[in-house]
Amino acid sequence: MDIKEYFARISYRGSYDKPDLATLTDVFQHHIRAVPFENLSIHCGESIELDLEATYNKIVTKKRGGWCMENNYLLSWVLKTLGYDVTLLGSKVYVPEYDAYADEIDHLLLKVVLDNKSYIVDGGFGMVYQIWQPMELISGTDQPQTPGVFRFLEENGVWYLEKVKRKQWVPNQSISTSHNVEKEVCRRVFLFTLQPRDIEEFRGCNAHLQTAPDSLFVTKSMCSLQTADGVRALVGWKLTEIKYNYKDNTDLVEIRIIADEEMEKTLKEKFNITLDKKFVPINISRLSLF
């Protein structure tokens, strides 16, 4: 494992001799624009290993992406190598269709302490709820970013992340009704505590999420990547490309359906992903990722 190979993977050419907020933000933004959030392994007959060297090989050497336990585990190694004070945290993701958070931790987060301030770093949420900058761990303060306004709320030691989404303009609305959001909405994202976690505590959830019949990751194939001005995501056969704040505090949402014979080309051109095994798209869950 070589930090310079990782920097080449994410096209980072900045300095890294000083573990400050500017460097943290720069490395983080390069990561989320180069490394997709994806679960394609599950849908092409591969298992997802919770092993740092295996993750490095997958993301850095094979130029794949990964889900939270891969992206953030690798990022924890990167940031520790650069001299940052990093702690693993566990969170429970909010499921709007059930109006409830997960029963058990199902998402890996990082806490970074800099100059006596704590920041949450999460390079593995993907889609439209992916933060673009480390978020200072303070309650009740809006933290505007390009994707929208994020904020933490703390109650009795439990921290909640929320995002205020902009209005969306969908030119070809006939393809999707779930996207026709008319107004700004506040959406809960996940909750977490500051209890330090060990990677071993995520082994059960890593196995469950890729095998349980009702797991979102089993019922949906997904791949998303942050871009310079938005995000693109392939869920099943539906490719969604969003340009944030296109005009008048409105996001532009463009959707098209990808044919099976276009899938390999789309993954390469839109996400820079080439798979070793045959990929079988799937989308049989009604749960929305947007």
Image: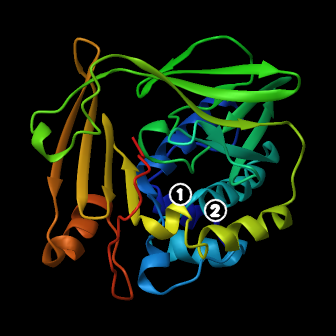
Residue 149 drawn at (x, y percent): 49, 19
Of residues 9 and 198, the one nearer the viewer is 198
Q: Which residue is mark 1?
A: 7
Residue 166 drawn at (x, y percent): 35, 20
244 versus 39 height, above or below: above
Q: Which residue is mark 2?
A: 3
215 versus 175 height, above or below: below
Asked if marks 2 and 1 touch (Cβ < 8 Å), the reply is yes
Q: Residue 138 occupies which quadrant of the picture?
A: top right
Residue found 87% across the figure and 59% down from its top? 198
Q: Residue 136 occupies which quadrant of the picture?
A: top right
Of residues 252 and 135, the one nearer the viewer is 252
Location of the N terminus (image quadrant): bottom right
Location of the C terminus (image quadrant): top left
Distance between mark 2 and mark 1 Cα atoms:
6 Å
| Disc 1 element | helix
Q: Which mark is residue 43?
A: none
The amino acid marked with disc number 2 is Ile
92 versus 259 height, above or below: above
Quick one: which residue is furthest to the front in this view?
98
Q: Is residue 62 visible?
A: no
